[in-house]
Image: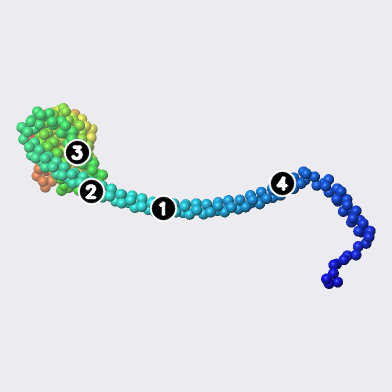
Amino acid sequence: MSGKEDYVRVRKRDLERLTTEIMQLREFLPKVLNGDLVESLHKARAAETMKASSEEEQDQLRQECQNLRSRLDAAQSQAQGEREVKREEDDGGEREEKLVLREQLWESREQLQQQAEFCTELGAAACTLLWSVSGKEAAVKDMLAEGKLGPFLVVAGQTLESFVKSLEDEGKMEQRDLCSHDNQFVLALAGVITNIAAVTCGRDFFASSAPVLLDTLTQLLGVMKPGACSKLKVLMLMALYNVSISVKGLQYISEGPGLLPLICCLLQDGDWEVCFHSLRLLQSLVLEEAGLTSTLRELLPLTRIRQLSSSPHSALRQAAQDTLEDLQHLTTAPPTGTCPTL
């Protein structure tokens, strides 16, 4: 059979059937395959072509989107790095600026401290001179004549109050006498007040125009702890005693309900000068009027006064003995005596 055509043996009946079916297909196929179906087939092929093209475009767009996303991630990473670098630079700049500001602040504080020390030193020197000058009666009269004494006493009272409060806040109250310009300044102010009160016109001025200062002195004496600020206490007590020589002054300070308890407390102080000047102020109150007799006997620590009457310090011993005698022989005579000046 090689080189010859292949043949298939078919029965005649099957061949006729196949021929009939082919003829039927040729007859009915044109009726089935009309124009709409052909058009639909063309549209389907076109849709398939468009779908393929769309898928290709989508793949291309997807690839471009992926490229853009990669570029965006790279740009974001770069921007983040730049921000971190800038932040580090800004932080470095801020730290440098803070260091500069801190140095300037330290310099300003040092300058303020130097200025404050200079002002305090100058004030201490000026008040020390004024303290010395105020020991003369003519100088005190000149101060009153010029009308500047009132504002000065207001400032002096505020300064004393601030000084005592600062010692209390800083825990320095236990230090009796601080060797500083601040301490000298305050002592000089208290000395000026004492010398002004030693002059008749001065203590009259206190009683009539500066009662607030008297209240401040009494208040500060009650704040200061026993054994502390002895020199300042002595000057304040001397000022109150000088004012008590005036009838109006004695009347004003004796009306204060806290004066007698204050004196009783000061008599317990360990410094003999504080006790001495407390006794002198008490003597002024004892000699004021007999109406205070019952109050005095109830409040005064007679046992302590008797102890002080045996003190080795002659001035204190004599003052305590005189006070005991005055308590036994109260009179209504006004207090007399010489005003202490410094």
Residue 52 appears in the figure:
yes
- Would you say 264 lies left or right of 140 here? right
Q: Which mark is residue 43?
A: 4
Q: Earlier in the sequence, mark 4 or mark 1?
A: 4
The residue pinned by badge 3 equals 159
**Mark 2 nearby-residue class (10 Å; few <14, some 14–19, many ≥20):** few
The residue mark sitting in front, 3 or 1, is 1
Amino acid on which the number 3 mark rests in the picture: Thr
First in sequence, mark 4 or 3: give its number: 4
Pointer 2 residue: 107
Q: Earlier in the sequence, mark 1 or mark 2?
A: 1
Crowding at label 3, few (<14), some or many (≥20) Cα neighbours within 10 Å?
Answer: some
The residue drawn where x is 74% and y is 45% is: 39
- Residue at (23, 46) in percent of width and height: 108
Looking at numbered disc 1 in the image, what kind of residue is underneath it? Answer: Glu
Q: Quadrant of residue 207?
A: top left
Of labels 4 and 3, the one closer to you? 4
| Number of residues whose C-alpha sits closer than 10 Å to that of mark 4, classed few (under 14), some (14–19) or many (20 or more) | few
Q: Are marks 4 and 1 in contact (CB under 8 Å)?
A: no
Please tell me whether mark 1 or mark 2 is closer to you in this view. 1
Judged from the image, the secondary structure of the residue bearing numbered disc 2 is: helix
The front one of 89 and 43 is 43
In space, the residues marked 1 and 2 are separated at their CA atoms by 37 Å
Work out whether mark 3 precedes mark 1 in sequence or the reverse, and give the earlier one.
Answer: 1
Q: Give the CA distance from mark 4 to mark 3.
A: 108 Å
Q: Amino acid at mark 4?
A: Lys
Name the one closer to the observer, 187 or 61: 61
**Which residue type does callout 2 highlight?**
Glu
Q: Residue 145: x percent and y percent?
A: 9, 28
State the separation of the CA atoms marked 3 and 1: 59 Å
